[in-house]
Amino acid sequence: MPDFCAAYGCSNRRCVESRQRGITFHSFPKDGERRRQWEVALRRENFVVNNRTMICSEHFKAEDFDRTGQTVRLKAGVGPTIFCFPAHLHKVVPTISTATFRRADDNLDVSLDEPKLDELGAMGERHKEEKQQATDHTYGFPSCPKSIKAKLDAASARVRKLEREKSNSIKRERRAKKCIQSLLKELEDKNLITEELNDNLERYSGFPVHLLPRQGVDYTQDQREFALTLHLHGPKAYNYLRETLKIHLPHPSSLQRWLSSVDSKPGLNKRMLDML
Ligand SMILES: [Zn+2]
């Protein structure tokens, strides 16, 4: 008579095919207390383990095995922890405190939920510590792909949603800083420009920041005036915008060049003088 795995929902049995897949079968402990712990871990109602009861290697973590000898053995003191329980047998005990992580934990609760600490004593404690590691290897994956797939789908949908939210909030932040006015406000808040300078620059406040070109040659006259005025009266503020906020303002050397050519542009010259 073939040996079937006693774990809930597992249909593995000892045969050529399971051997080829590297699945090994293990008897339950002879010792009464430990056998009882394994029995509890199975969560099978009215199921009594006997000396012929087997459980397959898919319910143990990779590090639970001693593979040094000819036969694969379980190390002393280990117990089965990986099962594919239906929802009504799940016992979710959140271990991470923030609400976000608790939600993620629920979604990711593939099958590693395990018997309560008081049921398994020290064995449970050990598994609790190793729960995280257990997700890192594939050896112990339960034989219930549909359930895993559903959980993974839910988890990745949640990841996608969080990524969308993050990207939206970055866009919102960018939009908030989109015009010169909000930049001026920030500069004033940081004491990088005086109220007076802010007033002087008021007429440029409607400039959309994203229209500031990347190369000096393309700046409009208004943009040049704004840059020149700010650089002249608030060089720190200018550098802050340019270097910290990465606003596309002309390099100070371009400003120098413009200033030296102001003579040949009477209109700009006059407006600059009016402002200064
Ligand atoms: Zn099994």
Image: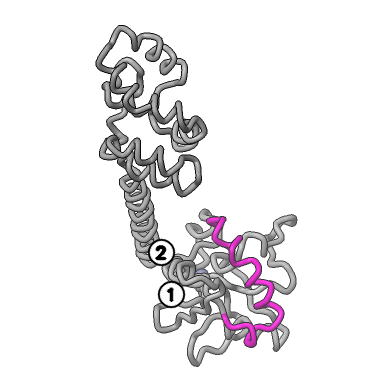
Q: Residues within 10 Å of mark 2 (few under 14, many from 20)?
A: some
Q: Which residue is mark 1?
A: 9
**Residue 274 appears at what percent x and percent y?**
31, 25
Q: Residue at x 59, y 67 (%)?
A: 131
Real-space CA distance between mark 2 and mark 1, rounded to the nearest whole angstrom: 13 Å
Q: What kind of element bears circle 2?
A: helix
Q: Is residue 12 visible?
A: no
- The amino acid marked with disc number 2 is Ile
Pointer 2 with pointer 1, Cβ within 8 A: no
Magenta-colored stretch includes residue 129: yes
Q: What kind of element bears circle 1?
A: loop
**Residue 113 appears at what percent x and percent y?**
52, 74
- How many numbered marks have been drawn onto this rendered protein structure? 2
Instruction: Using the image, tell me which numbered label, if any, was put on residue 52.
Output: none
Which of 27 and 264 lies nearest the eye of the viewer? Answer: 264
- The amino acid marked with disc number 1 is Gly
Q: Is residue 81 visible?
A: yes
Highlighted magenta segment, given as a residue range: 115-138
Q: Residue at x 35, y 36 (%)?
A: 200
Give the side of residue 167 with respect to residue 221, left or right.
Answer: right
Q: Residue at x 49, y 30 (%)?
A: 235
Pair 2/1: label in front: 2
**Main secondary structure of the magenta stretch:** helix
Please say if 18 is above or below 229.
Answer: below
Which of 47 and 202 lies nearest the eye of the viewer? Answer: 202
> Does label 2 point to a residue whose CB lies under 8 Å from ligand 1?
no
Q: Residue at x 50, y 45 (%)?
A: 191
Q: Which residue is mark 2?
A: 148
Give the side of residue 100 with respect to residue 266, left or right.
Answer: right
